[in-house]
Image (spheres, rainbow, N blue to C red):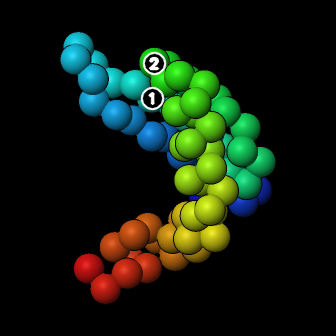
């Protein structure tokens, strides 16, 4: 999380020859990069982020998944 409360998210899916990738800034949901995903896939990924933003922001504030879970 940066000093203004923004979190950079990067989602990658392996495909033959590389990765599809989506970059997004939360909490504004501004897409910064989109390579290889269809619009339907982007919509589904953005829906996933909207449904989980509260957890993502909490984990970012507390030092990541390892610090916010019982791992």
For the residues labelled 1 and 2, the Cα–Cα distance comes to 7 Å
Helix, strand or loop at mark 1: strand
**Residue that numbered label 2 is attached to:** 36
Q: Which mark is residue 8?
A: none
Q: Using the rendered view, name the quadrant where residue 52 is placed.
A: bottom right
The picture places residue 36, in percent across and down from the top left corner, at 45, 18
Q: Residue at x 67, y 33 (%)?
A: 31
At label 1, counting other C-alpha atoms closer than 10 Å, the crowd grade (few under 14, some 14-19, many 20 or more) is: some
**Residue that numbered label 1 is attached to:** 21
Q: Residue at x 66, y 56 (%)?
A: 50
User: Looking at the image, can residue 2 be seen?
Assistant: no
Horizontal side, residue 3 vs residue 71: left or right: right
The picture places residue 12, in percent across and down from the top left corner, at 39, 35
Position of 36 relative to 27 (above/below): above
Residue placed most toward the observer, 45 or 58: 45
Q: Residue at x 22, y 17 (%)?
A: 16
The picture places residue 66, in percent across and down from the top left corner, at 34, 73
Position of 1 relative to 16 (above/below): below
Position of 16 relative to 6 (above/below): above
The picture places residue 41, in percent across and down from the top left corner, at 52, 33
Q: Count all numbered tags in the image, as a single digit.
A: 2
Decide: marks 1, 2 in contact (CB < 8 A)? yes
Q: Residue at x 26, y 79 (%)?
A: 71
At label 2, counting other C-alpha atoms closer than 10 Å, the crowd grade (few under 14, some 14-19, many 20 or more) is: some
Helix, strand or loop at mark 2: loop
Q: Quadrant of the N terminus?
A: bottom right
User: Looking at the image, can residue 46 be seen?
Assistant: yes
């Amino acid at each position: 999380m940066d000093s203004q409360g923004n979190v950079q998210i990067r989602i990658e899916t392996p495909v033959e020859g590389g990765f599809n990738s989506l970059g997004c800034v939360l909490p504004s949901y501004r897409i910064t990069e989109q390579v290889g995903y269809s619009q339907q896939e982007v919509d589904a990924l953005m829906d996933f982020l909207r449904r989980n933003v509260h957890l993502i922001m909490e984990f970012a504030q507390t030092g990541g998944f390892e610090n916010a879970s019982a791992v």
